Amino acid sequence: MLPLTFASAGSRVLIKRIGGLEDSKRFLGNLGFVEGGEVTVISENNGNLIVNVKESRVAISREMASKISVE
C-alpha cells in the first residue's frame, strides 16, 4: 500500500485505507473516498491531485491525498 500522492497521472487505483482524524475521514468520505472505492488520477501539480472518484472530478491537497492508502 502506498499513499495516493505516489499514484501517477492516468493510473487507476483501489482505496485500501483512509487514515487521519475522524473529521478528515468524514470529509473524504463525503467526497466519495471510501475503502474499496476506485480512483483515477487525472493530474498532479506539486503533490495536489485532481482525481475522478464516483464519476466526479475532485481536487484534493497533498495533505489529504497522503491520508489515502491505495493499491
Image (cartoon, rainbow, N blue to C red):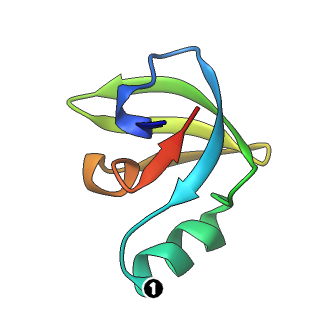
**Outermost residue, front direction?**
1
Drawn side of residue 62 relative to residue 10, left or right? left
Looking at the image, is 2 positioned above or below residue 20? above
In the rendered structure, which amino acid carries the disc numbered 1? Glu
Q: Is residue 71 above or below residue 34?
A: above
Q: Residue at x 63, y 57 (%)?
A: 33
Q: Residue furthest left?
A: 46
Tell me where residue 30 appears, x and y as whole percent.
64, 73
Identify the residue at horizontal 42%, vertical 75% (top origin): 24
Q: Looking at the picture, how far across and down is residue 27, in whole percent?
A: 51, 75
The residue tagged 1 is 22
Judge by depth and name the residue closer to the eye, 1 or 67.
1
Camera-nearest residue between 13 and 51: 13
Q: Nearer the viewer, residue 50 or 7?
A: 7
Image label count:
1
Q: What residue appears at the point 37 percent right and 71 percent down from the top-left corner? A: 20
Q: Quadrant of residue 26?
A: bottom right
Q: Secondary structure at mark 1?
A: helix
**Residue 59, percent from left and from top:** 46, 47
- Given the current orientation, which residue lies at the most extreme right position? 55
Q: Is residue 1 left or right of residue 64?
A: right
Against 29, residue 45 (above or below) is: above
Question: Crowdedness of circle 1 by 10 Å Cα count: few (<14), some, many (20+)?
Answer: few
Q: Residue furthest bottom?
A: 22
Residue 12 percent across, percent down from the top left? 66, 23
Image quadrant where residue 4 sits: top left
Quadrant containing the C terminus is: top right
Residue 38 placement: quadrant = top right
